[in-house]
Image (cartoon, rainbow, N blue to C red):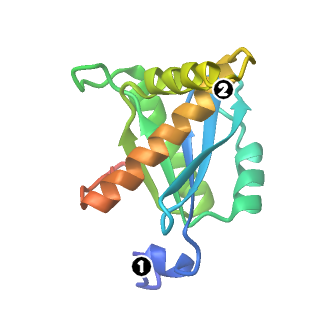
Amino acid sequence: MTPTGKDEDARHSDNDTLLAFDFGLRRTGVAVGNRRHGSASALTTLAGSGDGPEFDAIAGLLHEWRPCRLIVGRPTHMDGSENEMTRRAERFARRLAGRFGLPVDMVDERLTSVEAQDMIRSARRAGRKRRARAADVDKLSAQVILRSWLEQQQGGVASAIDTTGK
């Protein structure tokens, strides 16, 4: 709820655009999608300063795409236990929510990089010869994260993680 008592999504009810982030210290992949159509597409990779992406670059993407919600991948060990990157990604999600005033959900991102690399291999087999770069994997991972969030919403699975730090 917003301070006015209105649901956060109500402010953006005419907009179904979503942005998703595969957070990294050196590179952060970004994907864009639409929750009404269930679409997710790799968008870009933002360079980081060693502590994550620059928020000015994110502000530019938000201005261009005007999303109603942000999705951030939540990295964990394969057994689901947290690690240092889990805490950094959660901090990034809280900073996004605080700075831009948009709702932010987090999604389990285990194996998204593996799936992104599989997507690249499939494209190569289909005739694309360009060699994949790490940036390609990052933005495709963001696409997988967004697709996962969309699938969870269709299935009614709660995916939100408290980004308020409470």
Q: CA distance from mark 2 to mark 1?
A: 35 Å
Q: Residue at x 41, y 84 (%)?
A: 5
Horizontal side of residue 131 vs 83, given as left or right: right
Horizontal side of residue 47 vs 124, given as left or right: right
Horizontal side of residue 28 vs 102, given as left or right: right
Which sits in the foreground, 4 or 67? Answer: 67
Location of mark 2 (residue)? 136
The x, y position of residue 36, in whole percent, is 49, 69
Which sits in the foreground, 156 or 166? Answer: 156
**Disc on res. 125:** none
The x, y position of residue 102, in whole percent, is 54, 63
Which residue in the rendered view is the most extreme toward the left?
Answer: 79
**Corner quadrant of residue 155:** bottom left
The x, y position of residue 9, in whole percent, is 47, 74
In this view, the mark in front (2 or 1)? 2
* Disc 1 packing (10 Å; few <14; some 14–19; many ≥20): few
Which sits in the foreground, 113 or 161? Answer: 113
* On-image quarter of the N terminus: bottom left
Where 122 sits versus 16, above or below?
above
Q: Secondary structure at mark 1?
A: loop
Residue type (three-letter) at the residue carrying disc 2? Asp
Location of mark 1 (residue)? 7
Q: Residue at x 69, y 17 (%)?
A: 133
Residue 145 in view here: yes
Q: Earlier in the sequence, mark 2 or mark 1?
A: 1
